[in-house]
Amino acid sequence: MKRLESILILIGAVIAAYGLDLARGYADMLRIVKFTPAETLWMSLLLNFVFAGLMLGLAAYALVRSPRDKAIHIIYLVVGLLIVLMGTPLFFNGGVGLPVGIPYRLMAIDPGSYFILCGSFTALIGAAGLIKKI
């Protein structure tokens, strides 16, 4: 039961990070359309704080409250690495083409996106949990 809870919390954090990316894209759209950088600046700062709290909560749960189980930390490590490596091919010279009809911003795979940062943070949580077990 604790394993399922840890995995569901991981999935929720990844989905929340993707949602924060979409919100940041909306804030960028508002900045272009309305020419009001002050309001979008506050929204960007708020999104950064929400993301930081989300990742700290995930780390606290995974490293302190989760069962002392190697499988959970291995899952966190693998899922984090998969998320990070998912966006990598687009940023090499002659990278992968995007599917037709999908806007680039909605894919949330640029290196500075919350989605990719969530993946790298999740991989670090998994590695820290495995090191903690040694």
Image: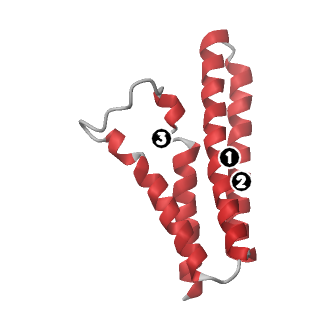
Q: Which residue is mark 3?
A: 109
* Residue at 54% in and 69% down: 75
Furthest toward the left, the residue is 94
Q: Examine the rendering and report whether any part of residue 64 can be seen.
A: yes
Residue 102 image offset from top left, x and y in percent: 46, 27
Q: Which is closer to the viewer, label 2 or label 3?
A: 3
Disc marking residue 16: 1
Residue 11 image offset from top left, x and y in percent: 64, 56
Q: Which is closer to the viewer, label 1 or label 2?
A: 1
Q: How many marks can you see? A: 3
* Element class at badge 2: helix
Q: Decide: is 106 above or below 74.
A: above
Three-letter residue code for mark 1: Ala
Three-letter residue code for mark 3: Ile
Residue 59 image offset from top left, x and y in percent: 67, 65
Side of 34 relative to 83 (left or right): right
The quadrant the C terminus occupies is bottom right
* Element class at badge 1: helix
Q: CA distance from mark 1 to mark 2?
A: 8 Å
Three-letter residue code for mark 2: Leu
Q: Nearer the viewer, residue 43 or 103?
A: 103
Disc marking residue 59: none
How many neighbours does mark 1 have within 10 angstroms: few (below 14), some (14-19), or many (20 or more)? some
Is there CB contact under 8 Å for labels 1 and 2? Answer: yes
Q: CA distance from mark 2 to mark 3?
A: 19 Å
Q: Which residue is mark 2?
A: 54
Residue 28 lies in what quarter of the image? top right
How many neighbours does mark 3 have within 10 angstroms: few (below 14), some (14-19), or many (20 or more)? many
Side of 1 relative to 26 (left or right): right
Q: Examine the rendering and report whether any part of residue 128 can be seen.
A: no
Q: Earlier in the sequence, mark 2 or mark 3?
A: 2
